[in-house]
């Protein structure tokens, strides 16, 4: 014969593991350090400056 299980404990364990999984996903998504955030922002600003530097002057529709 099998041993009976406590359904209340099983339900709580399942909820606990789901909560831990959500916490791990949030840590991966939002858990960046201040240095990482500032580095990413600096890279984005540099890319924007580089792109704007290669932009042609004037509107191409009005030239022709």
Image (cartoon, rainbow, N blue to C red):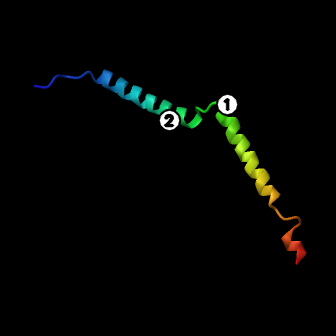
User: Mark 1 vs mark 2: which is more N-terminal?
Assistant: 2
Q: Is residue 41 above or below residue 57?
A: above
> Which of the pair 10/32 is nearer the observer?
32
Tell whether 34 sits left or right of 63.
Answer: left
Q: Residue at x 10, y 25 (%)?
A: 1
Question: Mark 2 = which residue?
Answer: 25
Question: Mark 1 = which residue?
Answer: 34
Q: Residue at x 26, y 21 (%)?
A: 6
Is disc 2 placed on a helix, strand or loop?
A: helix
The residue most toward the bottom is 64
Q: Position of residue 48 (x, y in %)?
A: 76, 51
Tell whether 50 sits left or right of 11.
Answer: right
Are the residues tagged 1 and 2 within 8 Å (C-beta)?
no
Task: Specify the quadrant of the image occupied by residue 34.
Answer: top right
Is disc 1 placed on a helix, strand or loop?
A: helix
Q: Position of residue 61 (x, y in %)?
A: 85, 73
Q: Is residue 40 above or below residue 16?
A: below
> Which of the pair 42/22 is nearer the observer?
42
Tell whether 1 sits left or right of 25.
Answer: left
Q: Residue at x 89, y 74 (%)?
A: 63
Q: Is residue 53 above or below residue 44?
A: below
Distance between mark 1 and mark 2 Cα atoms: 19 Å
Q: Is residue 40 above or below residue 54?
A: above
Q: Position of residue 42 (x, y in %)?
A: 73, 41
Tell whether 30 sits left or right of 22.
Answer: right
Density class for disc 2 (Cα within 10 Å; few <14, some 14-19, many ≥20) is few
> If the image is split into quadrants, where does the C terminus sit?
bottom right
Density class for disc 1 (Cα within 10 Å; few <14, some 14-19, many ≥20) is few
Task: Specify the quadrant of the image occupied by residue 12.
Answer: top left
Q: Position of residue 10 (x, y in %)?
A: 31, 25
Q: Residue at x 54, y 32 (%)?
A: 27
């Amino acid at each position: 014969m099998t041993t009976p299980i406590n359904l209340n404990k099983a339900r709580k364990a399942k909820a606990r593991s789901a909560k831990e999984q959500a916490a791990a996903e949030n840590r991966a998504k939002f858990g960046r350090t201040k240095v990482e955030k500032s580095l990413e922002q600096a890279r984005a600003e540099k890319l924007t400056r580089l792109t704007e530097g290669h932009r042609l002057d004037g509107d191409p529709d009005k030239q022709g």
